[in-house]
């Protein structure tokens, strides 16, 4: 059976230390690449797919995100004031009540080159990935049609992008499981939020891989990679 993705939560609280010096002035999702803010590519893809209930969880330089309202007046915000001392699970906690119905949970620092990777209707919970012969990044394998073995680095696997969509039933489980991990002590506050459904509580979920092509999404991991994509940054700060 199909379900409808009714909303999206965009996690945008982090500092972006590997993008220094540009992130000293600007949160990473708001950095422009060839004249376009990184987060705009995700927002436009969501809106094009008919998903206009969008909440951004912000933290570092949170006031900078207010400028998005000029172009996207229906955006909503949640604040994560714990972003410096916790991992992304704190951003999931900041929007926990919004994880319901059918819901995208997305990282904010991805350049969406092919907006078709975002879709309104899904048959299951799924995680956006592209096939990789070898990767040093976070990846999944596929077994019996399901995503398994979330880890960093692998061969003949699927390279993960930080975009996932969750069925109404899994949203309900996510709210409970994220809360339980968060309440479990200091260690639970240091995990990436996706560790909850993909590692710590994986038996509670059946997640499929939503396969895309490698060039459909670009993650800029460092200031040098930013310069390679947009040479105007070559003398930034000098």
Image: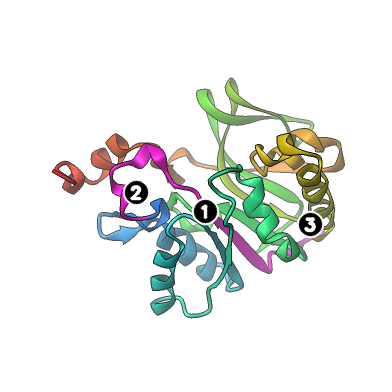
Q: Quadrant of the N terminus?
A: bottom right
Please identify the quarter of the rendering in which residue 215 is found.
Answer: top left
Q: Is residue 22 magenta?
A: yes
Q: State which region is magenta.
A: 1-26
Horizontal arrangement in the rendering, residue 204 relative to residue 34 (left or right): right
- Which numbered tag is attached to residue 39? none
Residue indicated by mark 3: 171
- Residue 20 place in picture, x, y as percent: 32, 41
Q: Number of marks in the image?
A: 3
Is residue 118 left or right of 22 when viewed as pictured? right
Label 3 or label 1, whichever lies nearer to me, is 1
In the image, residue 54 sits, relative to residue 1, either above or below, namely below
Residue that numbered label 2 is attached to: 23
The percent coordinates of residue 159 (x first, y second) are: 55, 33
Q: Earlier in the sequence, mark 1 or mark 2?
A: 1
The 10 Å Cα crowd at callout 2, few under 14, some 14 to 19, many 20 or more, is: some
Q: Residues within 10 Å of mark 1 (few under 14, many from 20)?
A: many
Compared with 77, 164 (above or below) is above
Q: Nearer the viewer, residue 173 or 113?
A: 173
Q: Which residue is the site of mark 1? A: 13
Image x and y of residue 136, in percent? 50, 23
Per the image, label 1 sits on a secondary structure element best described as: loop
């Amino acid at each position: 059976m199909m379900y409808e993705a009714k909303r999206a939560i965009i996690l945008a609280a982090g500092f972006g230390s590997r993008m220094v010096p540009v992130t000293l002035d600007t949160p990473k999702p708001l950095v422009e690449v060839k004249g376009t803010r990184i987060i705009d590519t995700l927002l436009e893809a969501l809106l094009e797919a008919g998903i206009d209930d969008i909440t951004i969880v912000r933290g570092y330089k949170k006031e900078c995100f207010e400028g998005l309202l000029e172009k996207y007046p229906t955006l909503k915000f949640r604040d994560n004031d714990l972003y410096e001392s916790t991992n992304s699970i704190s951003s999931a906690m900041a929007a926990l009540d919004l994880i319901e119905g059918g819901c995208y949970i997305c990282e904010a620092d991805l350049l969406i080159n092919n907006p078709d990777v975002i879709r309104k209707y899904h048959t299951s919970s799924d995680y956006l990935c592209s096939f990789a012969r070898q990767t040093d990044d976070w990846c999944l394998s596929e077994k019996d049609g399901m995503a398994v073995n979330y880890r960093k680095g692998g061969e003949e696997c699927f390279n993960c992008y930080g975009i996932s969509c969750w069925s109404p039933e899994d949203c309900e489980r996510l709210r409970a499981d994220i809360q339980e991990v968060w309440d479990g002590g200091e260690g639970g506050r240091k995990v990436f939020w996706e560790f909850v459904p993909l590692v710590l509580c994986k038996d509670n979920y059946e997640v499929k891989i939503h396969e895309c092509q490698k060039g459909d999404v670009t993650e800029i991991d460092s200031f040098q990679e930013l310069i390679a994509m947009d040479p105007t940054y070559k003398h930034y700060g000098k």
